[in-house]
Amino acid sequence: MRLRATLGALALRLDGNETPEELSAALAEAPEMPLEVEVAGPTPGSVVQALLEAAAARNLEVRFRPPRGERRVPHTEVVDHTLRSGQRIASAGTVVVLGDVNPGAEVVAGGDVIVVGKLRGLAHAGAEGNEQATIWALELAAKQLRIAGHVAVAPEDAPAPAGPERARVEEGQIVIEPWGRRRGA
């Protein structure tokens, strides 16, 4: 265990060798600042419980963060075939479909949805709340698109797409724009 003061918080590193008693004693003497906790090794639940109880007793805010040098990097899932009605692909990362997404098929991704073909089924990018996620398709003809918590429904008289398009969130709404062509060309 290592406890040190940083600008605006106490940095607490748990290595997995701590006991609940050691942790409680260290926090009892610590200044009243928010705790930024890094769990760097296997840590028993009793230690985590002691941490939360000691922080609650002193009314300290607790923030957990991943160990230094480690980040969660979602993977990219590649689907190498057309998705037919009734098929559903879900991934925490980006989904790339090398084929069409037919009506009745669904693609749900925590990241972007990229369709190298016609998108006529449901696409939900940023399903875990990521508003920076986008939906790309060579032909975007879906009746409904979702990005994070936003939903766009195509109008009944929507013109056929004239090439690759991208859907993204701008000012709280999903916008669809041409992609891959020069502006004014």
Image (cartoon, rainbow, N blue to C red):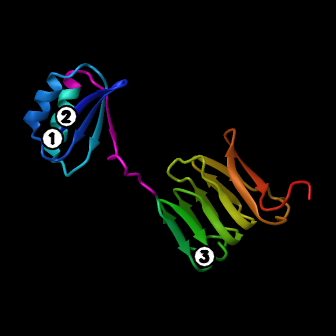
Residue bearing the label numbered 1:
47
Residue bearing the label numbered 3:
83
Q: CA distance from mark 2 to mark 3?
A: 48 Å
Q: As rendered, which of 7 and 59 lies closer to the eye?
A: 7
Tag 2's secondary structure?
Answer: helix
Establish if 34 lies above or below 119.
above
Residue 100 lies in quadrant: bottom right
Residue bearing the label numbered 2:
51
Find out whether the residues at labels 2 and 1 contact each other: C-beta distance under 8 Å.
Answer: yes
Characterize the local packing of mark 1: few (<14), some (14-19) or many (20 or more) Cα atoms within 10 angstroms.
many
Characterize the local packing of mark 2: few (<14), some (14-19) or many (20 or more) Cα atoms within 10 angstroms.
many
Find out whether the residues at labels 1 and 3 contact each other: C-beta distance under 8 Å.
Answer: no
Q: Is residue 96 magenta?
A: no
Q: Looking at numbered disc 2 in the image, what kind of residue is underneath it?
A: Leu
Q: What's the magenta region? A: 56-73
Q: Is residue 38 left or right of residue 85?
A: left
